[in-house]
């Protein structure tokens, strides 16, 4: 039965059967590998025990001391998710200047984004090539159909035309069936990889500020508490100075 099915498939797709099957196989393998990575990273990010150090850092209002950094490093080094690995990298370089840590963090995030997007370019290329292969198969099928019709001695019937056109259009349909899921998966996985790196970079930048000596940084807040305290102090002083100015007549 498999041999019969493959023979039927090869009859319908013609000489482009193997190229289309190769594109379909590569796209399927890349999608399965990226899906496994997506599920693994998602489970690591939502697992409560894996993010305990983030909660402890959120609740901390003290400055970065040697004891705090060592305790935090012990928690993050035992985990393998993206955020914990980035935090471990920063904590190990706590004695370096803030600018060097930022450069190191930028290089590391770029590498992680490339790793998360591995194979997506190939998936996009498959999504572009597959319809073109299908179109090429259609053109070759039409050429073969008209060649056979030209050799026939009798009149051309609508049944012969419909059968020939149906076989010629099979390759276009096969190419689109491969291309649409491949392009969709490539864009979805790309959006997910970019979001992962942006979220990790946001938390790691605030961790870097905490290591630099800024107190009361709330990771889940829209603004830093230390900066808001400075801003409120400046606003009060500006209001007091403005109230002391008498209006001129």
Image (cartoon, rainbow, N blue to C red):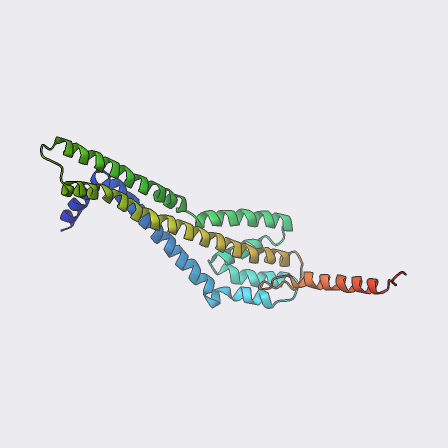
Left or right, residue 70 beside residue 34: right
Q: What residue sits 83% from the left and 65% below the top? A: 243
Q: What residue sits 52% from the left and 50% below the top? A: 109
> Residue 23, how many percent across, how many down?
30, 44
Residue 70 against residue 187 in the figure, above or below: below
Looking at the image, which is closer to me, 46 or 11?
11
Left or right, residue 136 beside residue 58: left
Q: Is residue 166 visible?
A: yes
> Residue 214, how many percent across, how many down?
67, 59
Farthest right residue? Answer: 249
> Residue 108, how many percent across, how many down?
52, 49
Q: Is residue 88 visible?
A: no
Looking at the image, which is closer to me, 177 or 206?
177
Looking at the image, which is closer to me, 121 or 216?
121
Farthest left residue? Answer: 154
Q: Quadrant of residue 59?
A: bottom right
Left or right, residue 194 beside residue 132: right
Quarter of the image with the C terminus in it: bottom right
């Amino acid at each position: 039965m498999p041999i019969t099915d493959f023979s039927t498939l090869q009859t319908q797709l013609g000489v482009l059967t193997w190229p289309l099957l190769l594109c379909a196989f590569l796209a399927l393998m890349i999608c399965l590998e990226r899906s496994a990575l997506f599920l693994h990273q998602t489970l690591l990010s939502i697992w409560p025990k894996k993010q305990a150090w983030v909660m402890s850092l959120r609740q901390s209002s003290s400055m970065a001391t040697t004891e705090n950094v060592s305790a935090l490093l012990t928690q993050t080094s035992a985990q393998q998710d993206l955020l914990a690995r980035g935090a471990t990298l920063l904590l190990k370089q706590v004695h370096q200047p803030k600018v060097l840590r930022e450069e190191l963090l930028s290089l590391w995030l770029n590498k992680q984004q490339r790793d998360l997007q591995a194979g997506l370019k190939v998936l996009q290329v498959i999504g572009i090539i597959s319809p073109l292969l299908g179109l090429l198969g259609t053109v070759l099928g039409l050429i073969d159909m008209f060649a056979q019709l030209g050799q026939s001695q009798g009149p051309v019937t609508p049944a012969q035309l419909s059968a020939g056109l149906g076989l010629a259009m099979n390759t276009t349909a096969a190419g689109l069936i491969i291309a649409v899921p491949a392009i969709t998966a490539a864009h979805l996985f790309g959006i997910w990889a970019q979001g992962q790196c942006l979220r990790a970079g946001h938390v790691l930048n605030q961790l870097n500020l905490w290591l630099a000596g800024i107190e009361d940084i709330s990771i889940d807040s829209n603004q830093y508490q230390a900066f808001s305290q400075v801003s409120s102090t400046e606003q009060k002083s500006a209001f007091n100075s403005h109230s002391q100015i008498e209006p001129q007549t």
